[in-house]
Amino acid sequence: MNQNTGGHYVQYGCGICAPTEWENFDASPTLRIQKIPLLGKLVQSRLNVVFPSNVRYGNIVEGLPVQDNFFSGAYCSHTLEHLSYAELPKALNNTYKILREGSIFRCVVPDFEYSANEYIESLNKGNADASVIFMESTLLGVQKRPRGWRSYAEFMWGNSRHLWMWDFLSLSKKLSKAGFTRIRRCSFGDSADQMFKLVEDRGRFEHALAIECVK
């Protein structure tokens, strides 16, 4: 598909990037609170992020509340790394299921290979903090245990930590197993389908692994 032909497009883990031409989903607990009648408006000023009104709650691991074989394109950016290893195949299978045959799926995740090479290069230079920098840059590990109910709640439900990291070979293998074909590395703005320009952000492609594939 070279251009939008009136199809439907979906992104999950959208955050506040929610163009009206797309159906936008996020699984943030903050969004769930925001959607509660009355309470959402009362606490909105205290929330760490306020989602656009057209963002719907949806968890790709459990399955989005949409039709199967419906969408002409799907996108997620810096979302899959927040899933556990066991959850990723479920997310990819659910993504595959809601796409029409021939549709494009593009995803962006932190590039584990890039981070690992940076760590080795820093280690070879004798940097004693190489491992610390690696753990901080990949958002792996826990620097401090939560203290107090608020910090514990953020730790348990904030979903900011990375649960698993991927490189091209490992993520391609999972995509192939889900049924996707024509799997390739992609870059910002290089899709033949112009609809992806509405959701992609150049900064999120930096030092990241971006993959395009087809159902």
Image (cartoon, rainbow, N blue to C red):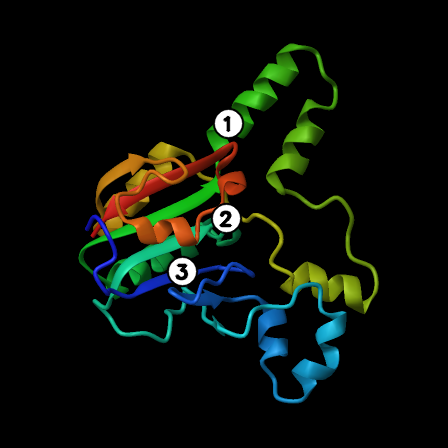
- In the rendered image, residue 205, in percent from the top left (x then y), is placed at 48, 38
Residue situated furthest bottom in the rendering: 38
> Which of these two is toward me, 97 or 191?
191
Q: In this view, does 63 lie to the left or right of 41?
A: left
Q: What element carries label 1?
A: helix
Q: Is residue 203 left or right of residue 60?
A: right
- In the rendered image, residue 19, in percent from the top left (x then y), is placed at 45, 62
Q: Is residue 38 left or right of residue 149?
A: left
> Which of these two is toward me, 66 or 140?
66
Mark found first going from the N terminus, 1 or 3: 3
Residue situated furthest left in the rendering: 101
Q: Residue at x 78, y 48 (%)?
A: 144
The amino acid sitting under disc 1 is: Tyr
Q: Which residue is drawn at 26% across and 43% down?
A: 192
The amino acid sitting under disc 3 is: Gln
Q: In which quarter of the image is residue 95?
A: bottom left
Work out how far the residue at label 2 is from the one at label 1, CA to CA, in angstroms. Answer: 15 Å
Question: Mark 3 highlights which residue?
Answer: 11
Q: What element carries label 2?
A: loop
Question: In front: mark 1 or mark 3?
Answer: 3
Q: In the figure, 2 relative to 111: above or below?
A: below
Question: Mark 2 highlights which residue?
Answer: 78
- In the rendered image, residue 54, in percent from the top left (x then y), is placed at 49, 73
Q: Residue at x 38, y 64 (%)?
A: 22
Query: How many marks overall?
Result: 3
Q: Kindly identify which numbered label has been placed on residue 6.
A: none
